[in-house]
């Protein structure tokens, strides 16, 4: 049975499954557009690593003792009950998350949320110049220069709200950003950087906390769709199985 699945995977081009996946995404997008509870344009970007056997998957080597792939994903957040994958890129696990930012962050009518692995000051300035909106968690050791502080209600979940420049004098952003200090879903104090000055700070905190949805999504497809157990060893076979998992999820939606 496993050998038959492996052989079938080798015979199917990933481009075919990618086309089916994107067709389902378009159908879901049309359905969710009519949802009154939709968070407009909120998209979460992240990746997950799937470890592989070194002997069977030498094309995906990223450590001395193991191989692996990285699934880079853009997830649309409709509401707390409904999220769906919109775009996927598969690479060997050794590829840095920043290498896929151009593929996954490319629309001006969206609000992107991502984590510390996507910090790139040059791209942040580029996004500001092109009108792309985003929010991300700032690294603890990041250098910040404060320009102005905004008032925060005493009963707010927001600890501080400021206008800042991020980076050292030698390497910093040309644009100014907004820094929000608040708590994550686990109660840990975090700093959020965004180029949105038109939203309430509490709304920005909620927007960043919605990023947890992609962690739950990765956990679901690995456990429910057995994405951790692959039936082929070629790059095409592995990519096919990833697309089949995404297709299955979209069909459920």
Image (spheres, grey):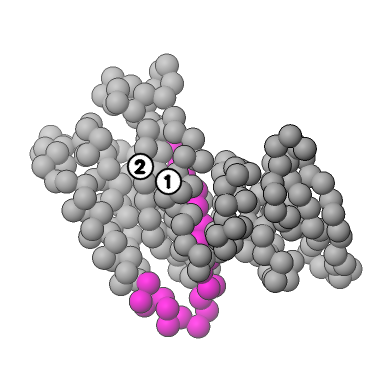
Mark 2 Cα-neighbour bin, 10 Å: few <14, some 14–19, many ≥20: many
Looking at the rendered structure, the secondary structure element under dot 2 is: strand
Magenta-tinted stretch: 29-50
Q: Is residue 250 above or below residue 237?
A: below
**Quadrant in which residue 57 is drawn:** top left
| Magenta-drawn stretch contains 240 | no
Image x and y of residue 106, in percent? 46, 57
Within 10 Å of disc 1 (Cα), the crowding (few <14, some 14-19, many 20+) is: many
**What numbered label is drawn on residue 90?**
2
Position of residue 180 in the picture relative to residue 229 (left or right): right
Of labels 1 and 2, earlier in sequence is: 1
Give the structural element (helix, strand or loop) at label 1: strand
Residue at image position (49%, 35%) is: 96
Quarter of the image with the N terminus is top left
- Rendering quarter of residue 177: bottom right
Q: Which residue is mark 1?
A: 72
Q: Position of residue 253 (x, y in %)?
A: 35, 68
- Give the left or right position of residue 144, taking residue 80 as reference: right
Position in image of residue 70 (x %, y %): 41, 38
């Amino acid at each position: 049975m496993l050998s038959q699945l492996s052989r079938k995977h080798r015979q199917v081009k990933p481009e075919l499954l990618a086309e089916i996946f994107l067709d389902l995404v378009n159908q879901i997008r049309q359905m969710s557009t009519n949802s009154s509870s939709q968070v407009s344009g909120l998209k979460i970007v992240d990746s997950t690593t799937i470890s592989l056997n070194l002997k069977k998957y030498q094309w995906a080597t990223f450590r001395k003792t193991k191989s692996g792939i990285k699934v880079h994903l853009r997830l649309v957040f409709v509401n707390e009950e409904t999220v769906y994958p919109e775009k996927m890129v598969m690479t060997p696990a050794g590829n840095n998350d920043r290498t896929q930012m151009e593929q996954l962050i490319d629309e001006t009518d969206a609000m992107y949320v991502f984590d510390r692995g996507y910090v790139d000051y040059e791209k942040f300035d580029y996004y500001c110049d092109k009108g792309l909106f985003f929010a991300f968690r700032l690294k603890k050791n990041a250098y910040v220069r404060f320009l102005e502080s905004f008032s925060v209600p005493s009963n707010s979940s927001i600890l501080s709200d400021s206008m800042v420049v991020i980076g050292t004098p030698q390497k910093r952003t040309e644009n100014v950003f907004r820094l929000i200090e608040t708590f994550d879903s686990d109660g840990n104090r975090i700093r959020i950087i965004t180029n949105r000055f038109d939203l309430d700070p509490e709304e920005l905190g909620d927007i960043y906390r919605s990023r947890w949805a992609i962690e739950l999504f990765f956990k679901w497809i690995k456990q429910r769709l057995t994405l951790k157990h692959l039936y082929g060893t070629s790059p095409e076979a592995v990519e096919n199985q990833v697309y089949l998992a995404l297709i299955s999820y979209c069909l459920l939606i």
